Image (cartoon, helix red, strand yellow):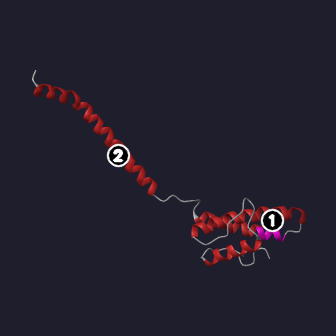
């Protein structure tokens, strides 16, 4: 057996491994490109703006109704809970509409004046809100 025959024999034995290795590298490359494309696709940060707007409108109407209710004992706790929910919805809408919003500290609702200003800014940005101008008055 001379050198040329030995090289041909080794090449013949290693060819299937080289082909399998090339297939594995090609599959991994295709998966990496697909993953990179998926990462580039914009993923919404929250629910659609329409859902947030509907929830915010409903909460503002509920807030107005509770504020006018005669039962004082239940009203204070309910209004605080509604203020927190309105804050969450208003901040989500502000993020979706790219309206500057104050930072929220922890789980507490925004102060009444800051929330009133945020609602006015959202209304100015085109979000139709019932009674946003008279919120909390």
- Please give the name of the residue rendered at 67% of the width and 64% of the height, measured from the top-left corner: 89
Q: Nearer the viewer, mark 2 or mark 1?
A: 2
Among the 4 quarters of the image, the one containing residue 80: bottom right
**Residue bearing the label numbered 2:** 29
Q: Which mark is residue 56?
A: none
Task: Measure the alpha-carbon separation of dots 2 and 1.
Answer: 56 Å
In screen coordinates, is 54 left or right of 24?
Answer: right
Task: Return the residue nearer the eye: 119 or 111.
Answer: 111
Q: Mark 2: give few (<14), some (14-19) or many (20+) Cα within 10 Å.
A: few
Q: How far from the left and from the top, in percent, is residue 17? A: 27, 31
- Please give the name of the residue rendered at 16% of the width and 26% of the height, measured from the top-left corner: 9
Q: Which residues are magenta?
A: 63-68
- Which numbered disc flags the more N-terminal residue, 2 or 1? 2
Q: How far from the left and from the top, in percent, is residue 76? A: 85, 64
Residue 111 in the image: above or below residue 34: below
Which image quarter is the N terminus in? top left
Residue 120 in the image: above or below residue 71: below
């Amino acid at each position: 057996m001379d050198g040329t025959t030995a090289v041909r024999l080794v090449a013949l034995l290693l060819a299937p491994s080289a082909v399998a290795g090339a297939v594995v590298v090609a599959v991994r490359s295709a998966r990496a490109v697909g993953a990179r494309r998926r990462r580039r696709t914009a993923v919404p940060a929250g629910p659609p703006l329409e859902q947030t707007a509907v929830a915010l409108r409903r909460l503002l109407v509920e807030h107005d109704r509770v504020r006018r209710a005669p039962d004082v004992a239940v009203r204070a706790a309910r209004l605080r809970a509604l203020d927190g929910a309105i804050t969450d919805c208003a901040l989500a809408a502000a993020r979706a509409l790219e309206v500057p919003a104050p930072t929220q500290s922890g789980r507490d609702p925004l102060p009444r004046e800051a929330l009133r200003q945020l609602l006015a800014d959202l209304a100015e940005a085109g979000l139709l809100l019932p009674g946003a101008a008279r919120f909390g008055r």
